[in-house]
């Protein structure tokens, strides 16, 4: 085991080195885009944990992203809290909210959970507008972009790039540890065969709610980071398209996959821009075509596609993270057919 | 095994980085060369506000016409317009792309209040002319704090005041019912209206009802308004809902004094579908010639616009007021560029934009002129009340000039 | 009292709109086990086709029926060509494909017909009729009648025709169905075709009220989900009833509960979805799914 871990570790370190070097090679605008990619990657990893590893559909993660962003914005704008502190606060708050949402969600599966979370996502803009006194209503809240501390000679974009990168690395490391250990196995077991997992003594209720909470926390942190990077929050930024986009990123990247979160983030950040370059007239039609094409060619996402390619090329057995995608309710119905 | 995946990531990242070249400096005037001027724009070509995307296209078509006729002072306009889907984070990204990557000389007609709010600070910090923003919000007329941002159309609050002034004069003891869209646009109208009514006047409001853009119908709100006993109806709705509001009001036999916001004053898209009979006696404030109004059929400005649409923007609808709006705005932009002569620096573009004197645009109402100065960043401030007589909008009264009322 | 009745009547009218699209959603779910997120957009597209036919001079009912035929064909083609490759993929992949379809339809409609809203004619008269002080829109009544008619057709089809039985079998147990000789693939295509037809009917009934534009079904779709959830995704009758309930409750809460007022009307609909899901996930009339372990 240890012999194959060293090259992997070296690979990751090399990647990290390149990522740290980028701010000195790219323009501020590109760094801004990459910061967005990292933020999306964190949010998508959160969604992956819930939907990919644990099989609970969520079409409402935009809601947690919005909560994180607004918590951060309100703290910075009203109470003059430094942006750094708003991030863990947003994370903890979303952890609690996610856990609380996860409890009743225990009773729902597949389609019904998707609908419940979809409703949550849809309700968010209206609720944000309603509590105008706190949220600034439809006008939103304008924020100041934080600049580098300690007089470091970095532009705000470079500094924020490092901040988002650091949070990404930290959360991905934590996530990997969580998902590869006992907890991860329990979560996957619950996804694959709920009843067997129960029978084996896993407290499914606790784990499922916890995963919901952690997943929401990740997405909330991403939202909080976005408040600083964009320096503006408004209800229009958090409509249902956001939730759908995160889900798209998650599926395209590869649902039960940590690296998939990064691929998915790259997809949702850059492909709409490419679609615009291809067709001014109907760019979203192009995006839709890309989406469908991806699903045909790589139904298990980019990460899944790479894994399969590797199997074919190297003939090596797969030491993947989770298995590919499966969904609880429908797996059982489809499995029923063969019984 | 995972290395393969990671290398892929690196490759992708580098590819994306390479696709965006680091801007080559060495241009003395940003966005300008001997042969071209770069003008940047964001518009919602997709998403919930995509109906307004036609403005961006109409503008592009007009610039093409100008280029075909030789350009401005020998330079062609290179118009770069990106889709922001009415989503502020996307607007920030696209505007940064325009400013930092495409290096445009100026931003023009960026659309929407939240999108513009998101980039307001940034463009002023970067000192990029942010001209003729396509929103009716009031905050763009602040030459002191935001010297690079300038509005365009008469703002919603001004329009609200116009109605309030008329109401106080003609129906001083009315009971007022209001229907408004629950967002910055609706609330801006509401504020102007309430401010115009004043403390005492505000007491005349008996019921306010709001709706969301996602609501399928507003029948329920109309029923409530009628039942509140209101004798005046201030209707702040977008075309889709204005049709419903006018129709339902007529159907349930409610006959209030009906003020309709300018946004929904189109004959073809609102009044006809609602019913010309039902639309009789509607009052609105106009600053543009309404393109489906038969009274302009032989007007020079109108016929020129139709010819332009047919040649340069044939897919654009001839009954969409947005296309007339975009056309007017583009003409104004070209006027600014002409006034710049050979000095197309950002400072001079801004200076000329703040130096428009009595400019007439072909589709503005007769008498309405564009005026700006270093302390007046509201180009169009005149409006005129009009009443619908069953066939067309008949202007009445005098031209209301918000500038003089300051 | 008058206000109450008028609001209920308005609520029924709006609810009729939700019910008609909810029927299409339920239809597809019953036939294929998939929630088609693109249902609203396909309905909108079909309505535009009808608009084009009307513009070319066809009389209303001829255009209406032609559109139904085109919608049916379209639905079948979409299922066979676009959905077929991912039929056996994980459920989320199919959801992704329907999302892709949604986006494509919306974008194409905007490109072909522009985003300017277009008036769409109603086959019913435009004079409202009054009973005492209560006003009933003629179109609203007509629309409700059409929705109920469609519901009746669905019921008869599934209950009393061999084809309907075959479709239900194919959805519940594809393997056994194949053994009995049912061509499962074509049953799925048929399901999509029929759902498209109902969607088209919904679109053509709704467009006169909401005015035709590419975002016609955007708001309606969510309410249709609420209706289907309330009534039960496995029960067409439930979905229709759900639609009416959502419409009426929404109006009454908006009028009488002042802290919600009209600002949170939408949230009320969503809260209803969540409450129903928590209390009885399969809806008021849905059948509980029993899973074999």
Image (spheres, coloured by chain):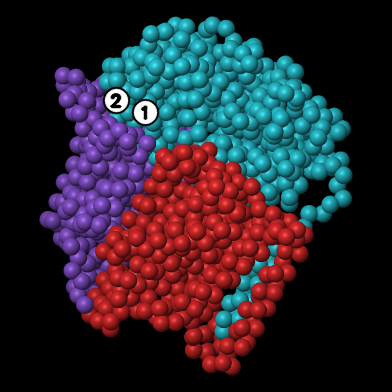
Left-right relation of A105 to A154:
left
Left-right relation of A284 to C287:
right
10 Å neighbourhood of mark 2: few (<14), some, or many (≥20)? many
SS assignment at label 2 = helix
User: In the rendered picture, chain A carries what hue?
Assistant: red
Instruction: State the residue in front, A187 or C244.
Output: A187
- Number of labels in the image equals 2
Horizontal and vertical percent position of residue A255 = 45, 70
Horizontal and vertical percent position of residue A286 = 54, 54
For disc 1, the chain is B
Q: Residue at x 44, y 14 (%)?
A: B201
For disc 2, the chain is B
Residue B299 can be seen, yes or no = no
The circle drawn on residue B209 is 1
Q: Residue at x 46, y 62 (%)?
A: A92
Q: Residue at x 37, y 25 (%)?
A: B208
Circles 2, 1 touching at the beta carbon (< 8 Å): yes
* Residue B356: quadrant of the picture: top right
Q: State which chain is coloured cyan.
A: B
Instruction: State the residue in front, B279 or A64.
Output: A64
Q: State which chain is coloured purple.
A: C
Horizontal and vertical percent position of residue C250 = 27, 38
Residue A131 can be seen, yes or no = yes
Q: Is residue B85 above or below residue A275?
A: above
Q: Earlier in the sequence, mark 2 or mark 1?
A: 1
Q: Residue at x 35, y 20 (%)?
A: B206
The circle drawn on residue B224 is 2
- CA–CA distance between discs 2 and 1? 8 Å
SS assignment at label 1 = strand
Q: Quadrant of the C terminus of chain B?
A: top right
Horizontal and vertical percent position of residue B338 = 80, 28
Instruction: State the residue in front, C61 or C223.
Output: C223
């Amino acid at each position: 085991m240890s012999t194959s871990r060293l090259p992997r570790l070296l690979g990751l370190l090399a990647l990290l080195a390149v990522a740290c070097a980028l701010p000195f090679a790219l323009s501020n605008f590109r760094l801004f885009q990459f910061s967005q990619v990292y933020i999306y990657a964190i949010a998508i990893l959160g969604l992956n944990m819930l939907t990919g590893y644990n099989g609970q559909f969520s079409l409402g993660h935009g809601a947690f992203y919005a909560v994180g962003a607004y918590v951060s914005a309100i703290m910075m704008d009203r109470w003059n809290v430094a942006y750094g502190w708003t991030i863990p606060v947003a994370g903890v708050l979303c952890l609690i909210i996610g856990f609380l949402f996860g409890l009743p969600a225990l009773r729902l599966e597949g389609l019904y959970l998707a609908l419940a979370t979809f409703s949550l996502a849809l309700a968010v803009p209206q609720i944000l507008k309603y509590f105008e006194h706190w949220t600034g209503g439809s006008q939103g809240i304008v924020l100041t972009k934080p600049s580098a501390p300690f007089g470091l000679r970095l532009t705000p974009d470079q500094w924020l790039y490092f901040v988002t990168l650091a949070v990404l690395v930290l959360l991905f490391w934590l996530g990997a540890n969580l998902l590869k250990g006992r907890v991860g196995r329990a979560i996957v077991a619950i996804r694959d065969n709920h009843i067997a997992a129960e029978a084996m003594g896993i407290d499914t209720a606790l784990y499922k709610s916890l995963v919901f909470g952690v997943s929401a926390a990740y997405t909330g942190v991403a939202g909080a980071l976005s408040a600083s990077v964009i320096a503006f929050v408004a209800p229009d930024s958090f409509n249902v398209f956001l939730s759908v986009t995160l889900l798209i990123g998650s599926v395209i990247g590869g649902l039960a996959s940590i690296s998939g979160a990064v691929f998915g983030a790259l997809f949702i950040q850059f492909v709409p821009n490419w679609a615009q370059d291809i067709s001014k007239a109907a760019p979203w039609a192009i995006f839709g075509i890309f989406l469908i094409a991806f699903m045909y060619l790589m139904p298990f996402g980019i990460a899944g596609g790479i894994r399969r390619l590797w199997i074919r090329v190297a003939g090596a057995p797969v030491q993947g993270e989770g298995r590919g995608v499966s969904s609880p309710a429908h797996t059982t119905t489809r499995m029923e057919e063969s019984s | 095994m995972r290395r393969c995946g990671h290398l892929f990531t690196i490759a992708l990242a580098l590819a994306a980085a390479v696709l965006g070249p680091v801007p080559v400096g060495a241009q003395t005037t940003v966005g300008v060369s001997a042969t071209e001027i770069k003008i940047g724009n964001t518009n919602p070509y997709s998403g919930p506000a995509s109906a307004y995307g036609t403005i961006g296209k109409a503008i592009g078509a007009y610039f093409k016409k100008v280029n075909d006729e030789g350009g401005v002072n020998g330079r062609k306009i290179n118009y770069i317009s990106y889709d922001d889907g009415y989503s502020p984070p996307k607007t920030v990204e696209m505007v940064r792309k325009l400013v930092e990557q495409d290096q445009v000389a100026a931003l023009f007609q960026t659309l929407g209040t939240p999108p513009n709010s998101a980039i307001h600070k940034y463009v002023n910090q970067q000192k990029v002319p942010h001209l003729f923003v396509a929103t009716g919000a009031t905050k763009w007329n602040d030459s002191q704090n935001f010297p690079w941002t300038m509005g365009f159309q008469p703002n919603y609050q001004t329009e609200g005041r116009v109605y309030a002034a008329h109401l106080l004069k003609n129906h001083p003891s009315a009971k007022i019912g209001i229907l408004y869209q629950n967002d910055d646009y609706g609330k801006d109208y509401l504020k102007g209206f309430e401010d115009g009514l004043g403390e005492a006047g505000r007491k005349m409001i008996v019921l306010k009802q709001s709706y969301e853009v996602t609501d399928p119908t507003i029948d329920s709100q109309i029923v409530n308004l009628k039942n509140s006993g209101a004798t005046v109806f201030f209707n702040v709705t977008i075309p889709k809902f204005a049709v419903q509001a006018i129709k339902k009001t007529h159907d349930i036999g409610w006959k209030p004094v009906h003020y309709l916001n300018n946004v929904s004053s189109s004959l073809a898209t609102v009044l006809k579908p609602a019913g010309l009979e039902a639309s009789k006696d509607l009052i609105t404030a106009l600053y543009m010639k309404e393109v489906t109004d038969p009274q302009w059929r032989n007007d020079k400005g109108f016929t020129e616009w139709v010819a332009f649409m047919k040649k340069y923007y044939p897919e654009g609808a001839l009954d969409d007021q947005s296309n007339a709006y975009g056309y007017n705005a583009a003409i104004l932009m070209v006027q600014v560029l002409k006034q710049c002569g050979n000095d197309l620096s950002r400072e001079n573009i801004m200076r000329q934009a703040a130096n428009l004197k009595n400019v007439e645009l072909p589709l503005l109402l007769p008498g309405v002129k564009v005026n700006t100065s270093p302390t007046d960043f509201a180009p169009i401030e005149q409006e005129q009340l009009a009443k619908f007589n069953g066939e067309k909008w008949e202007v009445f009264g005098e031209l209301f000039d918000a500038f003089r009322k300051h | 009292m008058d206000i109450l009745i008028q609001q209920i009547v308005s609520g029924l009218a709006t609810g009729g709109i939700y019910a008609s699209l909810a029927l299409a959603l339920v239809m597809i779910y019953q036939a294929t086990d998939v929630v088609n997120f693109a249902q609203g957009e396909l309905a909108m597209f079909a309505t535009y086709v009808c608009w084009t036919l009307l513009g070319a001079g066809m009389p209303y009912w001829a255009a209406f029926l032609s559109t139904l035929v085109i919608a049916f064909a379209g639905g079948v083609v979409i299922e066979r060509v676009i959905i077929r490759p991912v039929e056996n993929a994980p459920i989320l992949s199919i959801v992704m494909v329907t999302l892709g379809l949604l986006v494509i339809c919306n974008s194409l409609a905007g490109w072909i017909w522009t985003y300017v809203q277009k008036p769409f004619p109603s086959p019913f008269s435009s004079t409202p009729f009054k009973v005492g002080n209560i006003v009933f829109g003629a179109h609203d009544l007509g629309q409700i009648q059409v929705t109920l008619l469609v519901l009746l057709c669905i019921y008869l089809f599934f209950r009393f025709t061999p084809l309907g039985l075959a479709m239900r079998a194919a959805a519940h147990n594809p393997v056994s169905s194949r053994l009995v000789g049912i061509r499962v693939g074509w049953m799925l295509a048929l399901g999509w075709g029929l759902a498209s037809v109902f969607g088209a009917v919904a679109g053509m009934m709704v467009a006169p009220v909401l005015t035709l534009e590419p975002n016609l079904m955007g708001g309606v779709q969510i309410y249709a989900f609420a209706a289907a959830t309330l009534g039960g995704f496995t029960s067409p009758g439930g979905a229709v009833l759900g639609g009416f309930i959502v419409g009426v409750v929404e109006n009454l809460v908006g009028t009488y509960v002042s802290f919600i007022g009209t600002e949170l009307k939408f949230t009320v609909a969503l809260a209803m979805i969540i409450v129903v899901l928590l209390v009885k996930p399969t809806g008021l009339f849905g059948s509980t799914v029993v899973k074999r372990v």
